[in-house]
Image (cartoon, rainbow, N blue to C red):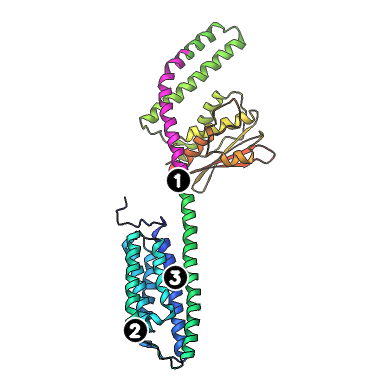
Amino acid sequence: MPSATDFTLSSTLPAHALLGRLLAVRVSLLAGWAAGIAWLHWGSHIPVPLLPMGSVLALMGLFVVATAWRLRQDIPATQMEFLAHLLADLSLFALLLYFSGGATNPFVSLMLVPIVIAAISLRPRWVWLLAAVAAGFYTLLLFFYQPLAISDPVAAHGMHLGGMWFNFLVSAGLIAFFVTRMHAGLRARDQELSALREKQLRDERIVALGTQAALAAHELATPLATIQTTAHELASEFANDPDIGNDCRLLERQAQACKRILTQLAARAQDSTPAAQPLDAWLAALIERWQVLRPDAQLLGAPPSIGRIFSPPDGLEQAILNVLNNAADASPDAVEFSAETDGGVLVIEIADRGPGFSPEHKAQAGRVQFSNKPGRGWGMGLALTHATLERLGGALILAERDGGGTRVRITLPWDQTT
């Protein structure tokens, strides 16, 4: 857990993102100061103390290199570290101003740039500290500085006005750059937080549903046993009537399938790990159990031949069954099924020839609870499947099937199945 000194900005942006933008500002200011000194000394023939100012620029260059190196590190930044960066920039600006006219230098307002950056990045107390330091430097520069030797007062006035104009452009550009980039970063962070909140709410609903399912499993055990026994007795009693006898045997098989599902729920509650087995055998058994539950559905496609050893993760079987049931509801006479491996990923595709999803439903599928089958089901199948696959590091992808219908693609990394 992060400590109190970790980077908790008022902007809520990551420290590295802010340091990267500060690096861009530093590079711009370093280039601007170097160009300005060169223009004064060689372009306008105004003598400036090249050695001390060059030393300050070299120190600024070292800070640029150090910041670039810092961005490559995974160590979390802190409020104090970012404050130290801004204090260093402010101090270097003050030194450059001291050697170039002090408060009379039109570029003195560049000291506002670190304060603006602090105001949108740091806590209020550090902003006020930085503002106080800047005010102190400005006050000192009113009395202590090395004046520039400009002999012509008219030229000095014109250069001062030109410098103020250029300083305004630079300051406005730097502030606009930092603030707009900050705003874009905040917008991206808000979207990320919104997605995380949505996922958390969905997971909470699924956990609550799992609790209710466990309670329901306990309550359903006795009624299912009664249904299975009664169906068996009726099948024996009406053995000479094929129609009634077949219906009773179907009812008995359905009750057995429901009991198996309840047994699986109980096993999951006890954290039992399913045995490893060949993938094709597991898929064949899954399809066989599904066809017991959906005897009206016709499955198309050759059985997969994937002999790789497979340990089914918790929830995957029900996720596949949910998709199969949706496909059977859409087109019971034609449900296409295929499975293959693609590198390190297991890929299962299930397609139907039904009406498909509307664009609105396709955008909602797997993320909110909805049903396009009024009166049939509760609309939770795809939402549960999506949540299960997301938890396992996989994905659920819906697409239109060529010729009509829907094609659902389930992907799962192999490292989740071994």
Residue 251: image location, x then y, percent: 54, 16
Residue 50: image location, x then y, percent: 38, 87
Residue ID for mark 3: 25
Instruction: Tell me if residue 225 is in the magenta stretch.
Output: yes
- Residue type for callout 2: Tyr
Between 179 and 261, the residue placed more toward the observer is: 179
Whole-number angstrom distance, CA of label 3 to CA of label 2:
25 Å
Residue at 46% across / 56% down in the picture? Answer: 186
Q: Which mark is residue 196?
A: 1
Residue at 45% across / 34% down in the picture? Answer: 206
Label 3 packing within 10 angstroms: few (<14), some (14-19), many (20+):
many
> Which label's residue is closer to the chain start, 3 or 2?
3
Q: Are marks 1 and 2 in contact (CB under 8 Å)?
A: no
Q: Mark 3 or mark 2: which is in front? A: 2
Residue ID for mark 2: 145
Between 31 and 406, the residue placed more toward the observer is: 31
Q: Are marks 3 and 2 in contact (CB under 8 Å)?
A: no
- Residue type for callout 1: Leu
Quarter of the figure with residue 46? bottom left
Q: Secondary structure at mark 3?
A: helix
Residue at 36% across / 71% down in the picture? Answer: 66
- Give the magenta range: 197-226
Q: Secondary structure at mark 1?
A: helix
> Which quadrant is the C terminus positioned in?
top left
Q: Is residue 367 left or right of residue 103?
A: right
